[in-house]
């Protein structure tokens, strides 16, 4: 049978309460019994001593060690003492012979038959020797059952001051009284315990039910999550640990709902990203094969097919990067390289877009080589993604400002562009997986929301951090840094390349210096400015548009 946490908790608390009451009852009964015995002993002792004193004062004469006491006076006092404490009082001589007895206790028939004219001589001698006796005994068979008995000697003092023991006094009280008293105490405690247990059980039940209510809600919510419904939330009723757990559970639900939404969007985006180029490729190839596209236009459409293939290649690379991040297999292949040159190479990839939107490039006029230790491919990917976003969202005729700063501790790169900016609520989530700032904007409608997530992961793999800030309708800034762990004293062979905007032709850039030299050595000359498309082969390879433009120039 399924046993809930509520039942377990209630059962445990109930057992604890029950055991506590049993222990308390047992301890109370023991202490009450002990207290009764103590009080009864003191009472019997006081009355036995009182009878002994009366006997001493009732002494009439002494002759040949024979003592005579006033029997009538003694009988009156013994009777009064016995009735007063509801006890049996016996007076014996030194040999144990009972000379006077008064019993106010109702004896059973067998007790009456068991009466003897004398008591055990050893018991009398013990009283005379020790001066006092207390115990639970039947007085050597005088009673049919054990009684609580106190015995004291009767001592008289002669005229010359000599003390002589002439007998003993015993006061006995039935144990039936203490048994009945103990039973009444147990009964009273039992009734009080039942009442207290019911109250405690009720309070515990209510508290347990209230305490486990959030857990039951979480269980139901978890079942809903398993069915794909992430809209269920757990009500928070307290600020204790259970309340904190409920809050954390709701936060987890929000994260799961957001993640589920982003995953669905991701699948939709990937499906669209795969479907669109494949449809384009299939249509154009079929058109070329069946002759729908004339031969003179085939190269044009093959160029479109080539672009779509590259688009698919970028999508596959993004998916592979994401897979490596998830599996923890994305590792650094560290090398020492010039991050300034990496910025230039990445920027050249967007030459045609920059020219088309007439974007002004700022901040690189006096850029110096900055060498860092890291993975060149990853840093290139970081810069490529950031520059791609900057070019994509910069308004026409706007600017992109790039700065690289080296300090002894770190190397910082910042990319700032004009444009619509990012809403404040989106800035803090801009690096989240599958997150897109505005799905309705045409500039970002085909994105998958993975670029900046991958950028952040790659920067953090280098031990650095990245941040974003933005003012709507003004600018957007991305800035990242990586540790500067290189040797500052080594002389490296570098290529210093400085580019800037052509003043006479806005939206284009030119190389104003490209010198191979040793760090720290003077520069002899500065070459003439040349077009950006005429620099290194690697730059041409990373810019297909530039390559086509260069081939066109060579053809001319």
Image (cartoon, helix red, strand yellow):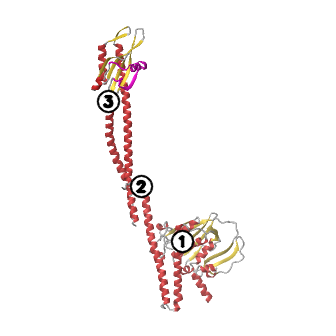
- Number of labels in the image equals 3
Quarter of the figure with the C terminus: bottom right
- Name above or below for residue 50 compared with residue 237: above
At which x and y percent is residue 94? 38, 15
In magenta stretch: residue 119:
yes
Q: Position of residue 521 (x, y in %)?
A: 72, 72
In terms of image quadrants, where is residue 334?
bottom right
Q: Earlier in the sequence, mark 2 or mark 3?
A: 3
Image marks 2 and 3: residues in contact by CB distance under 8 Å = no
* Res 250 visible: yes
- Front one among 130 and 270: 130
SS assignment at label 1: helix
In magenta, the rendered stretch is: 117-141
* Magenta span contains residue 345: no
User: Is 378 in front, or is 97?
Assistant: 97
Q: Mark 2 points at which residue?
A: 243
Other residues around mark 1 within 10 Å, as few (<14) / some (14–19) / many (≥20) = some
Nearer the N terminus, badge 3 or badge 1? Answer: 3
Which residue extends farthest top?
63
Q: Mark 1 points at which residue?
A: 321
Task: Report the Cα–Cα distance between label 3 and label 1.
Answer: 92 Å
Front residue of 105/429: it is 105
The residue to which callout 3 is attached is 176
> Can see residue 476?
no
**In this view, the mark in front (1 or 2):** 1
**Which residue is painted at 46% across and 72% down in the image?**
266
Mark 1 / mark 2, whichever is N-terminal: 2
* Residue 122 - label: none
Res 185 → quadrant: top left
Label 2 to label 3, Cα distance in Å?
A: 58 Å
Q: How crowded is mark 2: few (under 14 residues within 10 Å), some or many (20 or more)?
A: some
């Amino acid at each position: 049978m399924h046993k809930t946490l509520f039942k377990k908790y209630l059962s445990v608390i109930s057992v604890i309460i029950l055991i506590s009451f049993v222990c308390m009852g047992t301890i109370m009964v023991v202490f009450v019994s002990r207290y009764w015995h103590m009080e009864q002993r003191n009472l019997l002792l006081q009355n036995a001593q009182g009878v002994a004193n009366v006997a001493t004062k009732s002494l009439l004469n002494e002759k040949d060690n024979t003592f005579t006491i006033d029997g009538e006076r003694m009988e009156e006092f013994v009777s009064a003492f016995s009735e007063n404490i509801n006890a049996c009082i016996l007076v014996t001589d030194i040999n144990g012979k009972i000379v006077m007895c008064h019993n106010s206790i109702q004896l059973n028939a067998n007790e009456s038959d068991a009466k003897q004219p004398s008591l055990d001589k050893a018991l009398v001698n013990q009283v005379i020797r020790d001066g006092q006796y207390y115990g639970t005994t039947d007085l050597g068979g005088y009673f049919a059952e054990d009684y609580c008995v106190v015995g004291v000697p009767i001592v008289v003092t002669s005229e010359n001051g000599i003390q002589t023991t002439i007998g003993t006094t015993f006061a006995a009280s039935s144990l039936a009284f203490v048994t009945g008293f103990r039973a009444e105490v147990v009964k009273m405690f039992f009734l009080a315990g039942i009442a207290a247990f019911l109250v405690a059980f009720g309070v515990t039940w209510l508290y347990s039910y209230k305490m486990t209510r959030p857990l039951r809600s979480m269980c139901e919510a978890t079942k809903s999550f398993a069915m794909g419904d992430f809209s269920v939330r757990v009500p928070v009723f307290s600020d204790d640990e259970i309340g904190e757990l409920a809050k954390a559970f709701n936060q987890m639900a929000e994260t799961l709902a957001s993640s589920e939404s982003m995953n669905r969007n991701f699948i939709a985006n990937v499906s669209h990203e795969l479907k669109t180029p494949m449809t384009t490729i299939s249509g154009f190839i079929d058109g070329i094969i069946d002759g729908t596209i004339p031969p003179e236009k085939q190269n044009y459409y093959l160029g479109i097919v080539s672009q779509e293939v590259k688009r698919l290649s970028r999508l596959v690379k993004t998916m592979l990067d994401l897979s490596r991040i998830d599996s923890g297999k994305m590792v650094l292949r560290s090398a020492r390289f010039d991050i300034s040159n990496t910025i230039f190479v990445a920027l050249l990839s967007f030459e045609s877009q920059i020219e088309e939107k007439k974007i002004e490039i700022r901040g690189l006029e006096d850029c110096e080589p900055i060498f860092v230790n890291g993975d060149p491919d990853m840093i290139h990917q970081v810069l490529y993604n950031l520059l791609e976003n900057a070019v994509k969202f910069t308004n026409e005729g706007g600017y992109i400002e790039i700065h690289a700063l080296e300090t002894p501790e770190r190397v910082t790169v910042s990319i700032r562009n004009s444009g619509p900016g990012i809403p404040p609520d989106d800035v803090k989530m801009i690096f989240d997986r599958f997150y897109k700032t505005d799905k309705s904007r045409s500039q970002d409608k085909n994105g998958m929301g993975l670029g900046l997530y991958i950028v952040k992961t790659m920067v953090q793999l280098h031990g650095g951090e990245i941040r974003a800030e933005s003012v709507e309708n003004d600018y957007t800034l991305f800035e990242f840094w990586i540790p500067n762990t290189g040797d500052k004293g080594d002389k490296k062979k570098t290529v210093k390349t400085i580019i800037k905007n052509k003043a006479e032709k806005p939206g284009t850039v030119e190389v104003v210096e490209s010198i191979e030299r040793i760090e720290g050595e003077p520069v002899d000359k500065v070459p003439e400015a040349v077009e950006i498309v005429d620099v290194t082969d690697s730059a041409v390879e990373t810019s297909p548009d530039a390559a086509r433009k260069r081939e066109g120039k060579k053809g001319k």
